[in-house]
Amino acid sequence: MERPTGETASVTARLLGQPASLRPQDVSAGAGVSLSVARDFWHALGFPLVEDEEAVFTEADAQALRQATDLVTRSGVPPQVALAMTRAFARTTDRLAVWQTQLMAEALTPPEQEADLGEQDARTVTDRAIALAAGDRLAELADAMEPLLVYAWRRHLVAAIARMAADADPGAESAAGAPVRVIGFADLVNFTSLVRRMTERQLAVLVQRFEMLATDVITAHGGRVIKTVGDEVLFVHTETSAAAAIALDLVEGMTEDPLLPDVRVAMAYGPVLSRLGDVFGTTVNRASRMTAVTPPGKVWVDDALTRRLASMSGFAMRPTRRRNLRDIGAVTPSELSRALGTRPREEIP
């Protein structure tokens, strides 16, 4: 864990309310819990354990620990569930904080300095003044951003509860006790060669554009982005026709964007295990393996999804040859396209 220095101590005080001055035992005593409980909470937040005499905590840490303790003692939440929820917050907010600091640092980097970065890692801010300025600016904006963070969490909590209730409905489609979903992977073509030809800064701009466009298309059709990993986006949907529209719009959108290379999309339909915000299972693996063999600028779907889309207007399927996918077995993907005469997609901003 990075310790606040003289230059960042003021940011720490502005974000957490006061400078770091408390030791682990001070925090545990202030929250009325044992030192071991305090350590479990701190570790669940994703931070390394600290020495007993290290004064790296503030009253905000003690307050958070008291709130976590109240969740158990007053609300009746089992301790293991409270720690699991803490880990969920930690994983999400860690990525959010890193993302926001990078965005702010990039926004504060002058164009001429970006050009001088050359092949350096775009994630690394090489100018300490810019790093400190980004931290200062984020500290200024924290109070304004916090309500938006809580609002977004509550909105997504509503959506997650609605999906869970729908899956639990006796009439909901499931297989082997798992909900059935459409799983899709969108993969940038020739990304490895792009990495060799582009500077890290150029590559960062490309990946950011890809993630933004993909997210806009997926969410516009009611899908969910599960995760993005550089040149690949994993998405999920409950409705087959909407998932098909996502895949086709992704291919068309990337083709029309002069900054982006072609994309290929593969989708599979079947039972999916959802855990900790991610998805697992044979359906996910099948879609992933199919993506590797899908031609550039095409959408391939598995047998199960082909059968469901065959009865829906607006789509056309053309069977491809049978293939054996590693750890999956034999599949006969179909190439998905729009049926002739269907209305073209709306322009994606």
Image (cartoon, helix red, strand yellow):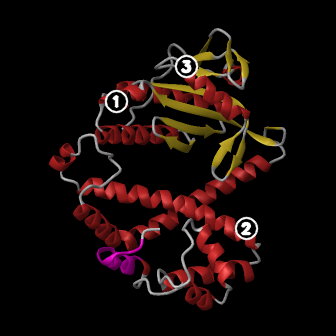
Q: On the picture, is 15 further left or further right than 49?
A: left
Asked if marks 1 and 3 touch (Cβ < 8 Å), the reply is: no
Residue type at tag 1:
Arg
Is any part of residue 314 visible from this angle?
A: no
Q: On the picture, is 93 further left or further right than 86?
A: left
Residue type at tag 3:
Thr
Question: Above or below — where is 244 with respect to 56?
Answer: above
Disc 1 element: helix
Q: Which residue is at 65% across, 54% downward?
A: 160
Residue 19, image x, y percentages: 40, 84
Magenta region: which residues? 3-15
Based on the picture, tell me whether residue 127 belongs to the magenta stretch.
no
Q: Earlier in the sequence, mark 3 or mark 2?
A: 2
Q: Earlier in the sequence, mark 1 or mark 2?
A: 2
- State how far apart marks 3 and 2 are (Cα): 41 Å
Mark 1 Cα-neighbour bin, 10 Å: few <14, some 14–19, many ≥20: few
Instruction: Give the label on residue 294, or none.
Output: 3
Of residue 115 and residue 305, the one placed in the foreground of this image is: 115
Based on the picture, tell me whether residue 11 belongs to the magenta stretch.
yes
Q: Earlier in the sequence, mark 1 or mark 3?
A: 1
Quarter where residue 348 is shown = top left
Mark 2 Cα-neighbour bin, 10 Å: few <14, some 14–19, many ≥20: few
Residue type at tag 2:
Val
Q: On the picture, is 303 further left or further right than 30?
A: right
Q: Which residue is at 51% across, 19% downward?
A: 298
Q: Residue tagged by mark 1?
A: 196
Residue 345, image x, y percentages: 45, 27
Q: Residue furthest top?
A: 321
Q: Residue tagged by mark 2?
A: 81
